Every structure is written in structure tokens, then in C-alpha cells.
Image: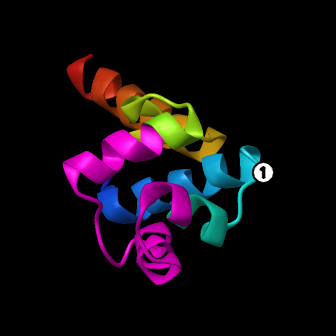
């Protein structure tokens, strides 16, 4: 059975960057609002470092998103194709 592994810090960072850009903010602008350095925000966006709980809360407020939006993953067709194949194989083995 194929394991679907998720790199949480990278996923989180990618979503922070996505919502920051949707908000029309630069790293410098958002980092000032969060009271952190631009370098710290950059490190979070690349997934090299994870944000603290208090920083996650501040990000949600500044980006006007829920915590689940920052941890969510866009499921693409490839994911569904793999899921369907696994389900079909499982059903086939049960018959």
C-alpha cells in the first residue's frame, strides 16, 4: 500500500506564501505586521522552520484565513488517480 507522506512545514510555508501573495503583501510588509524579520518569514515560507502557535495565530489574522487553510493541501488529479487505483485493487482482492 502506497503511503502518502506530507511535509507539514513545507505545506504550511507554501500556503503562507500563497495567501500572502493573494493579500497583495510582500514578505517585508507581512513580517513587519507580524513583528518578525523578513528572513524569519522567508525561512517559514520555504519550510525550513516551523512557526510557533502564537505566530500561526498572527498569520491567520493578518492573512484573514483559518488555521486549516494554512495546513490544507490542494488535492490534484494525481492524488485521486492513486486513491482510485488503491481502492480498485482492494476491491479486486476481496472478490
Taking 86 as reference, is 66 above or below it? above
Is residue 47 something one can see in this rendering? yes
Instruction: Tell me residue 92's x, y (percent).
Output: 34, 25
- Which residue is located at x 28 percent, y 65 percent? 50
- Which residue is located at x 27 percent, y 16 percent? 95
Taking 68 as reference, is 44 above or below it? below
Q: Is residue 74 magenta?
A: no
Q: Residue 40: name its quadrant.
A: bottom left
Taking 35 as reference, is 4 above or below it? above
User: Mark 1 — residue?
Assistant: 24
Q: Is residue 39 magenta?
A: yes
Q: Where does the magenta region start and end?
A: 32-60
- Which residue is located at x 56 percent, y 31 percent? 64
Q: How is the image coloured?
A: rainbow
User: Residue 50 or 73: which is nearer the viewer?
Assistant: 50
Q: 5 left or right of 85?
A: left
Q: 21 left or right of 90?
A: right
Instruction: Tell me residue 48's x, y (percent).
Output: 35, 78
Q: Main secondary structure of the magenta part?
A: helix
User: Residue 12 or 24: which is nearer the viewer?
Assistant: 24
Q: Residue furthest right?
A: 24
Taking 48 as reference, is 34 above or below it? above
User: Residue 28 or 89: which is nearer the viewer?
Assistant: 28
Instruction: Tell me residue 18's x, y (percent).
Output: 64, 52
Q: 72 left or right of 18?
A: left
User: Residue 32 or 72: which is nearer the viewer?
Assistant: 32
Instruction: Tell me residue 86's x, y (percent).
Output: 37, 36
All told, the count of numbered labels is 1
Q: 32 left or right of 19?
A: left
Q: Residue 70: name its quadrant.
A: top left
SS of the residue under disc 1: loop
- Which residue is located at x 46 percent, y 61 percent? 13
Amino acid at each position: 500500500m502506497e503511503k502518502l507522506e506530507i511535509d507539514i512545514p513545507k505545506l504550511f510555508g507554501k500556503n503562507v506564501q500563497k495567501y500572502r501573495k493573494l493579500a497583495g503583501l510582500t514578505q517585508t510588509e507581512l513580517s513587519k505586521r507580524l513583528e518578525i524579520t523578513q528572513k524569519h518569514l522567508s525561512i517559514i515560507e520555504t519550510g525550513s522552520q516551523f512557526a510557533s502557535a502564537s505566530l500561526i495565530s498572527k498569520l491567520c489574522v493578518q492573512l484573514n484565513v483559518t488555521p486549516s487553510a494554512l495546513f490544507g493541501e490542494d488535492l490534484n488529479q494525481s492524488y485521486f488517480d492513486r486513491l482510485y487505483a488503491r481502492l480498485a485493487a482492494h476491491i479486486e482482492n476481496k472478490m
